[in-house]
Image (tube, grey):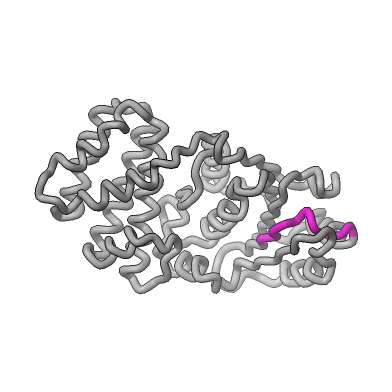
Amino acid sequence: MIFEGFFGNDSLRQQLSLALEQDRLPHAVILEGPPGSGKRTLAQILARACVCTAQGERPCGVCPACVKAKAGSHPDIIVESGGTAARSFHVDAVRRVRSDAYIKPNEASRKVYCLFEAQTMSEQAQNALLKILEEPPEGILFILTCPSASALLPTIRSRSLILTLEPREQSGEHPEAEALAAQILRELPLPDESAVLKTCAPLIQNRELLRQVLDRLTVLFRDAAVLRAGGTSLTRDPSAQELARQLTRDRLLALTELSIQTRRRMDQNANNTLLVTVFCAQLRAVAGY
């Protein structure tokens, strides 16, 4: 899976990627974690991955299904949410979901129901949800988010895969990764070929920072490709908008793939010095500078 905009929680990412690749996702997933841990972001990524039509890693971000999903208009991704108060997630919303779940998907191979702030479900609403979790139809996925799964009925928890997200400060996220990625993009078209390599020098000794910079570049390259194709920006980052003005869609997709492949080689324990040096050279070559 490609976790655009979601950082840290490496073991969780690997678990989800493997489950999606092997088509072993259960019919219900509970994402629990404190505010700011990225539960909603991860739920949206997983939902897009389930409807993505790409042959490689998903969600690709550029296929028609991904473009619709990012715009919030994919017919097979349904979102319901509770408010801030207890019991604000009403039983009527769950009943609508339950009725819709028995209708076949419109375009994708499965329907995905994102139920945000599930801890605000009334007991009546949870019992209504339990009825479909006990005997779910084929081709369906429920994604529930909440601070703690303990707020849900034991019978719901027992029928779901519970994934716990760590707070961002515990998941090792470096705040400088975003700034460093932006600097790399600013220096990419400069005549001095060594500028990007000098900027990337700290990454040789810091694999965690390298990982997050590669993830950030993947997000920006893919977002720029979507913009170039006429889609809507997910990050609204000026760097992505500038890339979309400067480079063709094919080059942006190639840069996306370069970042993904470099990240994969890093995960396979490639030599960091060689990895960073080659990546910097390939960045300029693929971008056409």
Q: Is residue 147 magenta?
A: no
Residue at 30% x, 57% y: name it: 253
Foreground residue among 141 and 127: 127
Residue at 24% x, 39% y: name it: 199
For this view, does 118 lie left or right of residue 258? right
Foreground residue among 176 and 262: 176
In the depicted structure, whether residue 199 falls above or below residue 50: above
> Where is residue 56 drawn, in percent x and y?
40, 52
Q: Which quadrant of the figure has residue 157? A: top right
In the depicted structure, whether residue 40 falls above or below residue 147: below
Residue at 34% x, 34% y: name it: 265
Q: Which residues are magenta?
A: 114-123
For this view, does 196 lie left or right of residue 26? left
> Where is residue 81 drawn, in percent x and y?
71, 64
> Where is residue 197 drawn, in percent x and y?
20, 38
> Where is residue 143 drawn, in percent x and y?
67, 55
In the depicted structure, whether residue 123 falls above or below residue 269: below
For this view, does 285 lie left or right of residue 111? left
